[in-house]
Amino acid sequence: MKEALFLKLDTNARRVDCQGEWTLANLHELQHEIKKITWPDAGKLVINGSGISKMDSAGAWLILRSVKKLESKGSKPQMVEFSDQAQKLLDFIYKKMENLVALPKVKASNWVIRLGKVTVEQLDELYEYLSFVGKLSLETLALFLKPWQFRFSSIVNTIDKTGARALGIIALLSFMIGVVIAYQMGFQLRNYGANVFIVDLLGLSVLREFGPLLSAIMVAGRTGSAFTAQLGIMRVNQEIDALDTMGVTPGELLLIPRITGLLIALPLLTMWADIWGIIGGMLMANNMLGVTPYDFLDRFQREIPMRSLILGLVKAPIFALLIASIGCFQGMQVEGSAESVGTKTTRSVVLGIFFIILADAFFSIIFSKLRL
Amino acid sequence: MAEQPIIEIKGLSTYLGGHWVNKDLDLTVQQGEVMGIVGGSGAGKTTVLREMLWLQKPNSGSIKVFGTEITTASSRALLALQRRWGVLFQSNALFSSLTVLENVAFPLKEHTSLDHETINELALLKILMVGLPADAAIKYPAELSGGMQKRAAFARAIVLDPELIFLDEPSAGLDPNSAEGIDDLILNLQGTMGLTVVIITHDMDSLWRVTNRVAFLGEGRVLCVEPMAKLCVNPHPEIKQFFSGPRGRAIKGTYQ
C-alpha cells in the first residue's frame, strides 16, 4: 500500500496529523487519502495542522469541508496547532463557505418546448427583419429628398471592396464553370453531331442562370459575411450606440451606403461573370468539339437574343438587396459576445444563399408565365 | 537561503511603432510584495506587463519570473510558469460565451484532474471570495455590471491559487465603492494567501492603500522604485508633475 503522505490517523488518541503541502496541485491525492481513511464515527477528534508546510485556499477548503462532513456524522472535530497564516486563511474561507449554496440547475426542456421556442424565435426574427427593411426604406426615401446627404464616398468604398476586389475570383470561377458546362453538354451534343448547338446551350444557361447565380452566391459568402462581422463587432464595441448618440443614424452612415454600393456592384459583377463564363465555354468548345472561336461568336450574336442577358441582369439587383439587407440585419442583431458574432455571420451567409435560390426559383416561375 | 526575487527584469528594450517604448529597463519584484507600476500614458506600462507574461517579445533584455528566464524558456517551462501566475486584464477578457462559473472553472478544468463537483465547488468558492453573490455564477458576463465583471475576472485570475498575480488597471472605470472593494480584496488575499502582486494603476487611493513599493515608468525606463510616501516627494520633474496635480495632493494629505 502506498504510504499516506498527507494524513496520519491515530485511532487510539483520536488524532489526525495533517502534513505536507495542502495545495491545489495535490488536491486530487488529498481527496483520495481522505476517502481511504476509516474515520471514527462519534466523539472527539483532534485535527493537528502543525505538520502542514504550505496551504492554499483549495487546501483550506478541503479541510473545512471534511470537518463539516465529520460534524454531520456526529463526531466533534477540533482543529489545533495550525500556523497563524493558515488559521487566517481558514477563517476567511470558513466565512465564505457559509454562503456556498447549490446552484439552481437549468432544466432541460423537452422537444415540444424547444420546437415552440424556435418557431416563435423565427417568426420574431422575420417580423424584425421586415420592420428593419421598412425602416431602412423610409430612411432611403427621406434621403432622396435631400440627396446631398448621400454618403457617396462610402458608396464608392463599398463598390471597391465588394465589387472591384472580387473581380479576380469571380472571373476565375465563372471561367471554370463555363469550361465544366461546355464539357458536360459537349458529350451529349457530340453523340448527335450537333456540336455547334453548344453555343445556344452555353449562352442561354450562362447568361440567364449561371452568371447571376454564381456571382450572387460568391458575393453572399464574401460580402454578406463581411457586413455582418463588421457591424457585429461595432455593436459589441458600442460604436453603433456612439453613432446614435451623435445624432447620426447607423442606417444613414453604415447601412444605406453598403446596400446601395452592393446594388451597383453586383449587376456589374454579373456582367463580368457572364463574359468569363462564355470565354471558358468557348475555349472548351474549341478544344473538345472543334467549334472555333470565330464560329462560336458568329453564331452567338445570331442566336442568343439580347433578352437573355437582360433577364439575367434583372435578377442581380434583387439578389444584391437580399444579400446586403440580410447581412446588415444580422450584423445589427449581434448581442454582446464573440459567439453571437459567429452565429450571426453563419446565419447571414446561409440565409443569404437560401433566399437567393428561392428568389431565383420565383424568377423562373414568373419568366415562364410571361413566356420570356 | 537568500530570498530569490519573483520577477527580475534586466536591460529590457522594446522598439514598437517607430520608437523605443522602453530602453534598458530594470525592475525587481520581491516575494510577497505588492508592486505598483505607474507612469504617464504611453510610458510603456502595459508593454512591460505583456512582456512579463510573454505575450509580446522584447527586442533585447532578460526577464526572469520565478527564476526562469522566459525569453529563452521552452514551451513546457512556460506552461509550468503559467500555472503559477494569474492575470486580470484591463478589459477583463472574460469568455463571453461561458457563464461566470464556467469562466472561473475553466483553468481548473484545463490544469487539474479534479472531478466535476470539486471543480464547481472550488470555482464557486472563488466567486464568493471576490465578493460576488452566488447567483451571479450562472449569469453570462454580458449580464453583469462593470464592477461585477471585474470581480469575476479576478476570481478567474486567482482560481489556481497562483503565487503571483498581475493586475492591469483593476479599478479603472469602477465607482469608488467597487474600487475600494477591489483594493480590500487585493489586501485580503495578499494577507491570507501570501500573494505577490504586480499592479498597474492610476488610482491614487489604490497606490496608497495597497502597494508596498511603486515603480515609476518614464523616459522608457524605471525612473525609481520607492514606497508611495517617498515617491511623491521625489524631486524628478516628471514624477513631481505626476503627483502634484490636485488629485495627487488631496490624497497625500489623507494618507500621511
Image (cartoon, coloured by chain):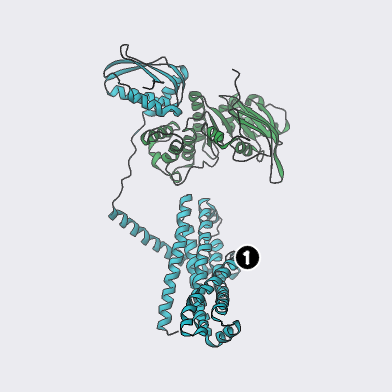
Asked whether the viewer can see residue B156, the reply is yes
**Residue A195's spot in the image, x, y percent?**
51, 83
| Residue A150 in sight here | no
Question: Extreme top residue here?
Answer: A13
Viewer-proximal residue among A116 and A6: A6
Total numbered circles: 1
Q: State the quadrant of the N terminus of chain A.
A: top left
Q: Which residue is mark 1?
A: A153
Q: Quadrant of residue A83?
A: top left
Question: What type is the residue that disc 1 sits on?
Answer: Ser
**A324 to the left or right of A81:** right
Q: Position of residue A48 (x, y in %)?
A: 39, 15
- Is A337 situated above or below B68? below
- Which tint is chain B? green
Q: Secondary structure at mark 1?
A: helix
Q: Nearer the viewer, residue B190 or A132?
A: B190
> Crowdedness of circle 1 by 10 Å Cα count: few (<14), some, many (20+)?
few
Q: Quadrant of the C terminus of chain A?
A: bottom left
Q: Position of residue A171 (x, y in %)?
A: 58, 70
What residue is rendered at 44% in x and 31% in y?
A: B129
| Frontmost residue, B100 versus B133 | B100
Residue A119 location (% of width, % of height)? 33, 59
Rendered hue of chain A is: cyan
Identify which residue, A194 or B105, lies in the foreground. A194
